[in-house]
């Protein structure tokens, strides 16, 4: 007979094996975006589908259910706070989700998404939603089915959100977003009404790509990104990929007439990479070695990109260095002019190019539309009209076409419903954590102004990175800051920073 | 009950799955040598060992034996020449070899090789054989055990050789090599006695690396290497890696003061790559989609590198182009001077840097020593002394130290016994095939002198690349040339080429 201890041991081995398979898949995906010759795409698709099938079979083996029952037959382990308890809690959570969705449905979603993705690429190119409509409709129907299989209390959207941000409900996100919106839109209107404008042509001067590479790499290294256990490469759609201990890679793309794109992109991915590089290596392959959620991951990328990288003390240190490497572009610019230019607030169509204030409005718009699609309140064919109306309402500018409207993001084409809100949750968690860091580290601004980010990194290692999945996202924020996550810290940060910049 | 047809179908699926796993492993190995951050080595080792274990378990499952019996219960299929017959023949060959070696022995060899490899790296650095001796001794004992498990008729070396060059025996290689040696050494002595010498300082002038990349890539493309389904990267120890259809990659290393190293290295790997890129894609995952043997693979790398790339017509076309890209180095050089310089014959210590004449002597030396080690005639501790004595006897120069002697090659450190002779077999097969190509293609020299290599590539596709493993290596050579492989064509080629160059 298997003892509880043996069952736990066996679960650990299966978990490690599954993670090893996933890490191989991550490398294959990374390589697909970076170096793979184009004719290798067919073989790569076969390799990836083989690996994901292998991992899925491992982790939905009914044996897992039996082992989970044996390992914690009376629920005592999970009630404690030991590492073992955490692992059992998270294995149970993933297993229960996975087995509820029939393999045929998973495969049908995957197949439909491949076709839908192609349709989306075409639709976006031609800015013609009707090309994407039939496949998107099919995909949504399948995703709804998936939500029904998983089950939920209030709304099917909960079932989807829980896959990316375990423990957070749609109702909770709504409260946060409603509160945020109520203060964000007035702030945006005030900024738009203010007479001050930054000289943004500064960031659109000529920035040679070879020098951007050097400068970006130096900036990532200054944050503590370990290039002995990581890389920086060029791709079409930037991302960060952590394969496991000692191997965490960031990517970017360069435009020689726009400073912000690659530079802040690198800082953003570096934030993800620092989380990945500092997870507990000895727990690799178990939940205690994993990041908590997409929202907490995003809190780290936004923290390093914005709260640090778009701050005045940061540029006090980095601007003279930027002038050295870009003398032609920045020779006649002051640090204040530059700081203002990289912090311009201006409604724009494309989410990934949005500033710190308007970014969250982009997310809220998507969150509301996604929910309405999943519950069926919004018909798929009505998405463009509703999108455009809401966009103008939120951002104050009319949408010129669907490419710059509801077709801009890739997520729906791969059935990634329930994902978007985590981008704004990252800002919300990040701001609340960063406010606490400021309390704990009164010298933070001086350290940043001297280019010393190690005390900040050390704080984050201790309070977040080294903990794996010990806490769920909301618990972590409460554990760190002493209060439940809310919109207040983010609004206080935005009001203070942009109030001062625009002299509101 | 499983029918013969069902059994064949099932074997095909297992074979394809195993190959897919191997192709993933190949990518991981390629990436390890090209882009992996150094701290990722531990995780990569785990990933690779997981994949090789997975493939090994798949292919040594006793079910395979049963399926093979059912698929060809009366041996009729294998007796025919259908694709199915070939696949069954090769599956049987691999399976019978694999299952004879106990998994524990395979694992022990792998573990010992990891330690032995580190010891070899140190030993080579310090040129101290005693550092490598204990681990090499262990490894050889294990490899002998492996040979005993596999079984053999004449000598345990047969069991090892058969893993790389199926169907070729040690006795056969001995005959070829004895015949070769009897004519090679006199040729070498005659060359050394000749008064003519090329101006080799030409190839040691300054060749900027960025231009070497461009020129090398152009040379590979001219041979028909498809960069849409391949890449060229820089590594420490160059190799070619074919992952599967549409993805075949070559590598090189550059020295800015030596033209030959990267240029002929690229042509060599391109030869391997052309074979890989032109295997029948629809048979991928079965022996009918695989290359025949290491010897035949090497015949292609040596054919493109030497018989084509070191020929006079080749340089008639490429030399003016080399002058354009390296005007400083080659402005005052004639095509004849250059042709002679890249074809200098001169005994040297390092095999991979050897010319066409002395290269084979390096291989013969290793072949004789390896055999004596495996049979036990030669004690491991006596390797350096015997190596040095034989080296001077073969090449006519004394070995200055073990780093440039018996420690120079990596193969033994990973238990690669039985492998070396395939390098010389490549020359022998290649020369005999190339002589037949000359008969079939009377315009070959003119085509090469015009930079047109497509007729040659087409010939090779039809007669070799598209055939997968239809023939074993000796059968293929006989099939193509109408006679069994022998040393005559290689010696005729070398005598003719170098007799003319050195005016013997």
Image (cartoon, coloured by chain):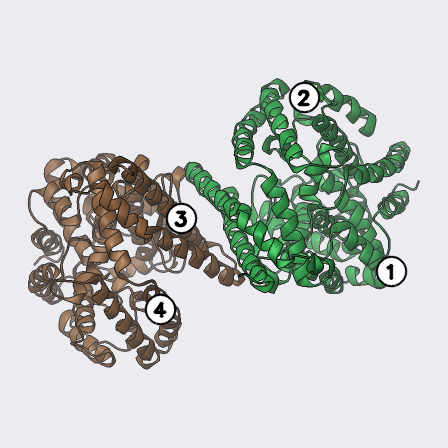
Chain colours: A brown, B green
Q: CA distance from mark 2 to mark 3?
A: 41 Å
Q: Are marks 3 and 1 on the same chain?
A: no
Q: Are marks 4 and 3 on the same chain?
A: yes
Q: Secondary structure at mark 1?
A: helix
Q: Residues within 10 Å of mark 4 (few under 14, many from 20)?
A: some
Q: CA distance from mark 3 to mark 1?
A: 52 Å
- Is the C terminus of chain B in the top left, top right, bottom left or bottom right quadrant? top right
First along the sequence among labels 2 and 1: 2
Give the image location of residue B503, x and y in percent: 92, 42
Give the image location of residue B207, x and y in percent: 64, 44
Q: Chain of mark 1?
A: B
Residue at which label 3 appears = A21
Is mark 3 in CB contact (under 8 Å) with mark 1? no
First along the sequence among labels 4 and 3: 3
Question: Is A374 on the left or on the right of A282, as rendered?
Answer: left
Q: Chain of mark 3?
A: A
Q: Are marks 2 and 3 on the same chain?
A: no
Q: Secondary structure at mark 2?
A: helix
Is mark 2 in CB contact (under 8 Å) with mark 1? no
Q: CA distance from mark 4 to mark 3?
A: 22 Å
């Amino acid at each position: 007979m298997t003892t509880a201890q043996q069952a736990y041991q066996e679960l650990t081995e299966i978990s490690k094996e599954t993670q090893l398979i996933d890490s191989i898949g991550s490398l294959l995906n990374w390589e697909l975006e970076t170096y793979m010759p184009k004719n290798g795409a067919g073989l790569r698709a076969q390799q990836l589908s083989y690996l994901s099938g292998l991992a899925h079979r491992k982790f939905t083996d009914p044996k897992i259910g039996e082992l989970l029952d044996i390992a914690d037959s009376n629920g005592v382990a999970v009630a404690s706070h030991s590492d073992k308890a955490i692992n059992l809690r998270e294995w149970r959570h993933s297993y229960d989700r996975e087995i509820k969705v029939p393999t045929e449905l998973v495969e049908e979603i995957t197949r439909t998404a491949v076709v839908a993705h192609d349709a989306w690429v075409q639709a976006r190119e031609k800015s013609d939603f009707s090309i994407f409509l039939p496949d998107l409709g099919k995909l949504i129907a399948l995703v709804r089915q998936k939500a029904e299989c998983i089950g939920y209390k209030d709304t099917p959207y909960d079932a989807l959100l829980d896959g990316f941000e375990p423990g957070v409900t749609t109702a909770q996100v709504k409260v946060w977003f409603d509160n945020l919106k109520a203060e964000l839109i007035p702030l945006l209107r005030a900024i738009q009404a203010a007479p001050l404008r930054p000289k943004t042509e500064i960031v659109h001067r000529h920035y040679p790509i070879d020098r951007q590479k050097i400068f970006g790499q130096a900036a990532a290294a200054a944050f503590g990104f370990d290039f002995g256990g990581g890389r920086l490469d060029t791709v079409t759609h930037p991302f960060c990929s952590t394969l496991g201990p000692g191997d965490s890679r960031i990517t970017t793309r360069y435009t020689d007439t726009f400073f912000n794109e690659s530079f802040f992109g690198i800082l953003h991915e570096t934030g993800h990479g620092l989380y990945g590089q500092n997870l507990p290596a000895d727990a690799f392959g178990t939940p205690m070695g994993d990041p908590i959620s997409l929202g907490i991951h995003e809190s780290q990328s936004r923290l390093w990109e914005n709260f640090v990288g778009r701050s005045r003390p940061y540029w006090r240190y980095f601007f003279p260095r930027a002038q050295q490497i870009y003398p032609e572009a920045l020779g006649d610019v002051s640090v204040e002019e530059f700081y203002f230019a990289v912090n311009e607030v201006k409604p724009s169509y494309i989410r990934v190019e949005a500033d710190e204030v308007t970014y969250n409005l982009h997310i809220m718009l998507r969150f509301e539309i996604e929910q309405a699609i999943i519950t069926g309140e919004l018909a798929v064919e009505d998405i463009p009209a509703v999108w455009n109306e809401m966009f103008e309402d939120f951002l104050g500018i009319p949408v010129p076409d669907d490419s710059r409207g509801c077709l801009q993001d890739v997520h729906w084409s791969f059935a990634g419903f329930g994902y978007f809100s985590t981008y704004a949750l990252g800002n919300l968690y990040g701001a609340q954590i960063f406010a606490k860091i400021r309390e704990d580290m009164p010298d933070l601004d001086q350290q940043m102004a001297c280019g010393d980010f190690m005390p900040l990194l050390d704080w984050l290692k201790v309070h977040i990175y080294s903990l794996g999945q010990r806490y769920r996202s909301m618990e972590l924020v409460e554990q760190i800051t002493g209060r439940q996550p809310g919109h207040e810290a983010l609004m206080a940060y935005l009001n203070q920073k942009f109030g001062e910049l625009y002299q509101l």
